Image (cartoon, rainbow, N blue to C red):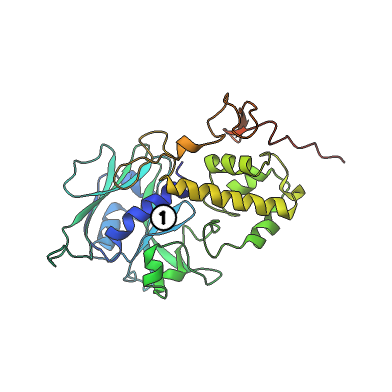
Amino acid sequence: MPELPEVEVVRAGLEPAVSGARVLAVHVLDDRALTRHDGPAEDFAHRLTGRTIAAAVRRGKFLWMPLAEPGDDGRPEALVAHLGMSGQILLGRDRPAAKHRRILLEVQPAGTDRDGSPEQPVELEFVDQRTFGSMALDAMVPTIDGAPAGFAGVVDVAEPDAPWRRNVPGQVSHIARDPLDPAFDDARFIQMARKRSSGIKRVILDQGVVSGIGNIYADESLWAAKLHYDRPADRLPRASLQLLLDEVRSVLARALEDGGTSFDAQYVNVNGQSGYFSQRLNVYGQQGKPCPRCGTTIVREEFMNRSSHICPVCQPRPRPRTR
């Protein structure tokens, strides 16, 4: 599934086209793409048409576009995009319809061309091969800590006091902040982790504790911090947990530089281009190859209906608890 870097690449690609843009038309081509919307396709299209998109915002793996005008009930609303396992958001003009196009939005960008005339309308396609993703209009609620709800790129700087900044969609409100969020609280994460007896990988995959980290970046970060995925979180010193957070940030930052990790055509940016962080992976998917640090053969082990990739020497298995 897409993790923080892949979703941030999509958000950054959307930002210049949708910030301040007006929705001209909405075409729902497959009702399955509205499974998280509270209403039929006609309701989605009616409520979204004519509205202005204020920005493109992300928290962890979750992406939404707050709307400048309030909903019919006076509350702020946002267009939430759940990418699921294979969801994509593509931008273009007069491009051939994508094979698995589910929703098409026609939007009028806020900018102008070089001659000062309005930019031509842009097509925003929601594409999803497996139909696990969806779009939805959702009411927004204030953030618990009063800090900005998520990352919104240059709009954060241009409109720091915009009303939507400190509101988060209800569907995302239970999701913890991610380690690249300026409002992320390291001390709170460490405190929560040290209260859990489960393995540290389970903890960092829990989106209620810390968001944005999936299987790929968990394995890479744990390898960098020399921690076995099954080390009980409550037995880790604070210094080890802080080191892990630092490595998570470093891994995510490098993945962002490379446009995310793409193993197939499902994970692409808004222009349909793949990321290439897969070329810099140290352990994930590298089973049978030598560890870049010590030369020991990387192994793959079953973990929570998926897998974990480790170096048996750099990441020694924890000793069993003693009674």
Q: Is residue 287 above or below residue 83?
A: above
Q: Position of residue 205 (x, y in %)?
A: 58, 46
- Which amino acid type is marked by label 1? Leu
Provide residue 162's location: percent of width, then percent of height.
39, 74
Q: Is the residue marked by circle 1 packed among few (<14), some (14-19), or many (20+) residues within 10 Å?
A: many
Is residue 310 found left or right of 217 in the rendered image? right
23 lies above or below 252: below
Which residue is depicted at the point 34% across and 37% down?
129
At 41% from the left and 39% from the top, the residue drawn is: 276
Give the residue number, with chain letter if any, for mark 1: 63
- Relative to residue 287, is residue 243 drawn left or right? right
Location of residue 251 in the rendering, given as x and y in whole percent from the top left corner: 53, 47
**Residue 86 showing in the rendered view:** yes
108 to the left or right of 41: left
Q: Is residue 181 above or below residue 235?
A: below
Q: Quadrant of the rendered structure where residue 202 is?
A: top right
